Image (cartoon, rainbow, N blue to C red):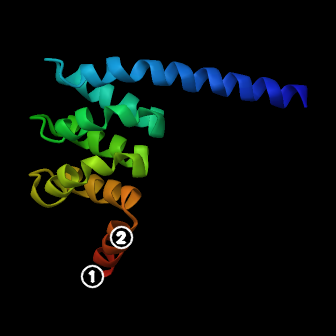
Amino acid sequence: RENEREKRKMRTRKIEAARAAVPALAKALGDANADVREDAAWALGEIGPEAKDAVPALARALGDANADVREDAAIALGKIGPAARAAVQALMKARFGDEDAEVRCVAAIALGRIVPAAKAKTERDRKVP
């Protein structure tokens, strides 16, 4: 029992640390260096739902000139899940309009994680030959 309490305390500290990093990571999505933007999007995805305050910045990142940044932004939004509902329009644009096939694919997956109806449509689309 004591070990479980310690684990919970450690998890709580990690979540608090992750939450504290979100504003800086969201700001980094606007950095001049594409590697910094890509790493920031990836890190926000690893934080998951606790990164919900970065949704507007991640939605903007879907329009980045760098495909890797757009891909990681879409993945991050999917990992944030339903709290990323404000990004649905940007994800739809990426799903159907991005020049990069991988970005289109991960945008579809992200939509499925954010909006259950979109998930059902994405699953139906996969079954079409």
Asked if disc 2 and disc 1 are in contact, CB closer than 8 Å, the reply is no
Crowding near the residue tagged with mark 2, few <14, some 14–19, many ≥20 C-alpha atoms within 10 Å: few
Q: Quadrant of residue 26?
A: top left
Label 2 and label 1: CA atoms lie apart by 17 Å
SS under mark 1: loop
Q: Say which quadrant the C terminus sits in.
A: bottom left
Give left or right: position of 96 versus 47: left
Give the residue drawn at x 49%, y 23%: 18
SS under mark 2: helix
Residue corresponding to mark 2: 117
Q: Which mark is residue 128?
A: 1
What count of labels does the image hold? Answer: 2
Horizontal and vertical percent position of residue 128: 27, 82
Horizontal and vertical percent position of residue 62: 18, 41
Give the residue drawn at x 35%, y 46%: 84
Give left or right: position of 108 versus 100: right
Q: Which mark is residue 101?
A: none
Toward the right, the furthest residue is 1
Give left or right: position of 127 versus 10: left
The answer to whether residue 41 is above or below residue 18 is below
The answer to whether residue 41 is above or below residue 62 is above
Q: Quadrant of residue 123?
A: bottom left
